[in-house]
């Protein structure tokens, strides 16, 4: 499985990698939603693990942009936000999963059950 992690915090990218490394053959990373579409186009990952709050382009816009060009893309939002409005917005943008960073190990369940 190929994964793309889109997260501006390097420590959080490392933590996410440590949770999913044994499930992935390859893991790619980028620091902002502004780079996510290009990274997706270049690497064609099986899953994108996408943060929401990033400096240039947030994860909801980036998710929408990827899904618009690649409707089959699998994107799981991995974020600190846990309110229903944001969760709804993520699914409306095209996300197929949503994980609060406090429950990071739930990412594994999504990758394993929806792959």
Image (spheres, helix red, strand yellow):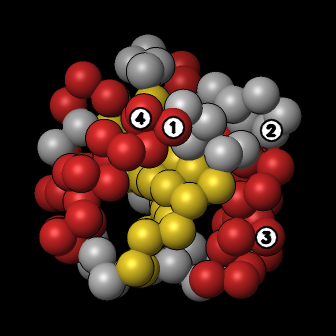
Give the answer, above or below, for where 52 lies relative to 110: above
Q: What element does badge 4 sit on?
A: helix
Residue at image x 58%, y 50%? 6
- Say which label, 1 or 3, has the lower sequence index: 1
Nearest-to-viewer mark from 2 and 1: 1
- Say which label, 2 or 1, has the lower sequence index: 1
Q: Which mark is residue 38?
A: 3
Question: What is the spatial separation of the Cα atoms under label 3 and label 2, in whole angstroms?
Answer: 13 Å
Q: What element does badge 3 sit on?
A: helix
Q: Give the residue pinned by disc 4.
A: 12
Q: What element does badge 1 sit on?
A: helix
Q: Quadrant of the C terminus?
A: bottom left
Residue 28, given in percent of the width and then of the height, sits at 52, 68
Give the answer, above or below, for where 42 lies relative to 62: below
Relative to 27, 72 lies left or right: right
Question: What is the spatial separation of the Cα atoms under label 1 and label 4, in whole angstroms?
Answer: 5 Å
Q: Give the residue pinned by disc 1.
A: 10
- Cβ atoms under marks 4 and 2 closer than 8 Å: no
Residue at image x 33%, y 29%? 100
Residue at image x 59%, y 84%? 44
Residue at image x 71%, y 83%? 42
Question: What is the spatial separation of the Cα atoms under label 3 and label 4, in whole angstroms?
Answer: 21 Å
Is any part of residue 64 visible from this angle? Answer: no
Is any part of residue 97 visible from this angle? Answer: yes
Give the answer, above or below, for where 106 lies relative to 11: below
- Say which label, 3 or 2, has the lower sequence index: 3
Nearest-to-viewer mark from 1 and 3: 1
Nearest-to-viewer mark from 3 and 4: 4
Residue 96, given in percent of the width and then of the height, sits at 43, 58
Q: Which mark is residue 57?
A: 2
């Amino acid at each position: 499985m190929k994964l793309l992690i889109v997260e501006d915090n390097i420590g959080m990218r490392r933590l996410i990698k440590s949770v999913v490394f044994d499930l992935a053959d390859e893991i790619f990373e980028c620091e902002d939603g502004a780079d996510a579409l290009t990274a997706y186009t270049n690497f064609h990952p099986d899953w994108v693990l996408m943060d929401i709050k990033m400096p240039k382009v947030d994860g909801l816009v980036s998710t929408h942009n990827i899904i618009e060009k690649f409707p089959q893309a699998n994107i799981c939002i991995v974020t600190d936000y846990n309110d229903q409005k944001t969760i709804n917005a993520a699914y409306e943008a095209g996300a197929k999963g949503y994980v609060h960073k406090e429950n990071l190990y739930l990412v594994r369940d999504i990758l394993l059950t929806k792959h």
